[in-house]
Each structure stands twice: as C-alpha cells, then as structure tokens.
Amino acid sequence: MDILIRSTPAEVALAAADIFTRYANDGATLGLATGSTPVAMYQELIARYERGEVSFAQSRAFLLDEYLGLAPDHEQSYYSDNRREFTSHVDFVDALVKSPAGDAADPARAAESYDAAIRQAGGVDIQLLGIGANGHIGFNEPSSSLRSRTHVTTLHPQTVRDNARFFDKEQDVPRHAITQGLGTISEARHLLLLATGANKASAVKALVEGPLSARCPASILQLHHSATVIVDEAAAAGLEDREYYLFADQNRVL
Ligand code: PGA
C-alpha cells in the first residue's frame, strides 16, 4: 500500500487528480465514489477538463453504490449527486456512466447484473474510494463479507446519521443500498482511497495499521497489489509509523 500524507485536503485533491488524469487520458474504466471527500478532486478534474488537460470521452465509469428505492433522477440518488458534482461537467458519454439500479423491481438481480456489467466492460481500472468513520467502503459496513459481490445491504445507523445532512430529515435517509461488494472492489486494478479530517483518523489507522478484518472493511486494501491511500494531516493523526510512510513517499521506486 502506498500511503501519501499531504498537509491539507486541497493537496489531497491535487495528488488524487494527478493519478485520475493519467487513467482518464488513457481511456480507462473509472470507478467513481460519492460523498464529500472526492468533491475537491472532482472540482480539480473539471478545471483541468476546461483547460483541455484531461478528457473522459474515451472512458466509461461505474459508481460504487446507490441507495435502494431511489430512481437515478431522484435528487438524492448517488447517480444524480455524481452528475451534479462531476460527470455532467466533463465529456463523459452519458450512457457509459453506470450506477446500480436502486429502483429495480428485483434489487438482488440488479446487483448481480451490475457485477456482470463491470466484468463485461473488462473490469475497473481505478476505483476511487472514501472511507466511513466506521471503516466502511461503499456501503460495506463493519461485518460485511470480505469476498462479497455487488449486493443489497443495510446501512449502519451511524451512516444514516452521517448522511442525514443531505436530506431534509434523518427519517428520509434510505436504510438500504446496493453496493459493490468487497470482492468486487478488490478486483479493480488500482484502488485509490482518500480521507480527510480528524473524524476519519481512527478509521485510517485501522485501515493501514489494524488487522485485516471485517470489523474495518477498508482493511481489504492490505490484500491489494496496487492500493494508494492519500490522507491529510488530520486524517493521518493516528498513524504510528508515519516516519516510514513519509520516507517511502520521498524515496519511491520508479
Ligand atoms: P464522506 O463519505 O466522503 O462524505 O465522508 C465517505 C464514506 O462514507 O464512504
């Protein structure tokens, strides 16, 4: 795992945008994440697109997860959120930006088809990830199977509370979602996890220095052959071996 510690969230966004730009310009299949953390990186990518430095015209994209019961055009769906924050501002081919069908009549089948669609597209080249304060990635909450495929799942009450800020009231937050499973996520060729802010410090410590455990779903990054974690100082605060992470970052094998 490569661990990059940057002083501010803005520098995290720049470092992540540098990596994403290379993949997009190669026409890669991109795995997108929703939430507050990637927004600054998306804004940087939009600015680079407007300057002609990056294009998404040759890329396709798969979202990580979607609320159950919300149609793609629902204001709070993750599909809509991604369009608002990112995909509608750059040159993606709309039909090539996919999300799990949160409003499907048979959600379990929709989850299976989503996994199949990712496989048919040749897999995800780079999967962007945030991390929940409880260590979740996607909506894979603590206790999720480390090998799970895309599936229907129940949100942790903490996640419901955390996400209530996007809804009028907490009762409006869906309790269920379709999420890429930890096994699905693990198959992406490169995992890029971003974390900023002090409320992520203990989850980041568990991800990097804790045991591989369903208690911290993000710890599956420890098994991945190509994972990059970019954190700001606040999110890095709990890391014990920061001396090594900084040394390895400055003395990278090219
Ligand atoms: P956040 O969410 O980026 O809004 O903090 C991350 C997550 O819960 O995965």
Image: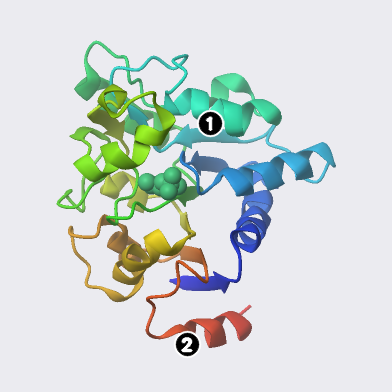
Mark 2 closeness class: few <14, some 14–19, many ≥20 residues within 10 Å:
few
Q: Residue furthest right?
A: 51
- Where is residue 151 shown, x and y percent of the image? 23, 33
- Foreground residue among 116 and 85: 85
Visible in this render: residue 139?
A: no
Residue 112, by quadrant, is top left
x, y percentage for residue 15? 64, 61
Q: Mark 2 points at which residue?
A: 244
Left or right position of 14 against 212: right
Residue 230, compared with residue 79, is above or below; it is below
Picture quadrant where residue 176 is located? top left
Q: Identity of the amino acid at label 2? A: Tyr
Q: What mark, if any, has residue 191 been given in the picture?
A: none
In the image, 189 versus 231, the foreground residue is 231
**Label at residue 82:** 1
Amino acid type, residue under disc 1 in the picture: Asn
Disc 1 secondary structure class: helix
Q: What element carries label 2?
A: helix
Q: At 61% across and 86% down in the image, what residue appears?
A: 251
Q: Position of residue 13 (x, y in %)?
A: 62, 55
Q: Is residue 137 left or right of residue 149?
A: right
